[in-house]
Amino acid sequence: MQSHPCPVCDGESQIGFLDRKRVPIHQNFVFPDRSAARQAPTGDLDMRVCVDCGFVFNHAFDPELMVYGEGYDNTQSSSAFFEAYMDDLVADLVENRGVRDCTIVEVGCGRGQFLRKLVEYPGAGNRGHGFDPSYVGPSSDLDGRIRFHNRYYDETCADVAADVVVSRHVIEHVPEPRALLSAVRAALARSPQAHVFFETPCVEWILRNRVIWDFFYEHCSLFSADSLATVFERSGFDVAKVDHVFGGQYLWLEARVGPMGPKPARGAAGLAELARAYGAAEKDLLRIWTERLQGLAARGPVALWGAGAKGATFANLVDSDCRLIDCVVDLNPNKQGCHIPGTGHPIISPNDLPRRQVHSAVLMNPNYRDENIRLLSAGGIEIDLVDWSM
């Protein structure tokens, strides 16, 4: 197996555990019709784990294929549950972490929802700068308290004296995470007291729970708590802690600007064996899920609940010809009426479930189960909700 040094710790010992060919490169673009969706561009997964630090990465990733633009939509603000989760993060930062009267920089701000919450928080007195080359919208907001920049955050941004840097669900999209963090560290050259907060998926949770739809092309870099701390420490930060949040699915790191210089990897903490076990089990997992969907489809039309990366990945893995899954439900009105990449399954509103006579829906994320039950009850819609863990 051809190898190259680990992007986090430079280790040479890696184990390949997952190989998928011709998967959609974007899971959060949707298409106006099935024909266009089935012609979505594809790439390969060659997932490897570093034996030394536990970092997981796609060796076959090609950054030239990735084009994030106006049509890219991974917002989850249509979910009241996820909005409440973000509100709790913001409250914790302001009330418990001292993010008050601060200049906040958000790296990869998307459309700025999280940054707005930090600036709008009552009595916080914060100001913000959002950096994202794919940002679409006004250059300022909230009476000038937020400014948006269509660019990357790097050493050329050192004139922005940041008290806090936050970045959520960006680093997993970056094939060279040390380069990203080194650029952030350089931008903070004049802000030596800055606090840094990063959120990213937890690969240990994915592997341990054998969540087959959480490996996809966009996420080329996946971290355990130890490998996330390692990459920050090797990029010039002092890591205060790494917490497991969102039901264990995400990691939340807190760090400060620290000294530059080489630091040892924190260790793999069994990640290599977890990855090896996952790879050995995946073929059986796909068979089990296919048989399960066949059983559900025998009782009536089946939907997936969630047209984001999880739903698109799962549909492409188990129903490439659209025989078992009738449709995909999503709360985001911008996705409804469109089709997911690869398979072309239609995306519908929950209110359309009775019209399609859907009998059961498979939840792509059990965190949203209670919210979805309330939505169905409010609409008088009776279907079976099936958790992946059930």
Image (spheres, rainbow, N blue to C red):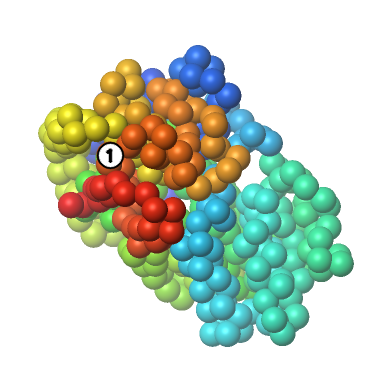
User: As displayed, is residue 271 above or below residue 333?
Assistant: below
Residue most extreme to the right:
143
Q: From the viewer's side, name the closer residue of 220 and 91.
A: 91
The reply, left or right, for residue 176 in relation to residue 118 is left
The reply, left or right, for residue 14 in relation to residue 251 is left
Residue 15 in percent (x, y) is at 24, 38
Q: Residue at x 50, y 47 (%)?
A: 331
Estimate how packed mark 1 is, as few (under 14), some (14 to 19) or many (20 or more) residues with alpha carbons within 10 Å: some
On the question of residue 48 being in view, the answer is: no
Q: From the viewer's side, name the closer residue of 323 and 112.
A: 323
User: As displayed, is residue 327 above or below residue 103?
Assistant: above
Q: From the viewer's side, name the closer residue of 302 and 153.
A: 302
Q: Quadrant of residue 226?
A: bottom left
- Tell me the amino acid under the disc marked 1: His
The reply, left or right, for residue 150 in relation to residue 342 is right
Question: How many numbered markers are drawn?
Answer: 1
Disc 1 secondary structure class: loop
User: As displayed, is residue 62 above or below residue 308?
Assistant: above
Residue with the mark numbered 1: 359
Q: Residue at x 55, y 46 (%)?
A: 332
Residue 373 in percent (x, y) is at 35, 58
Q: Quadrant of residue 324?
A: top left
Residue 289 in percent (x, y) is at 19, 35
Quadrant the N terminus occupies? top left
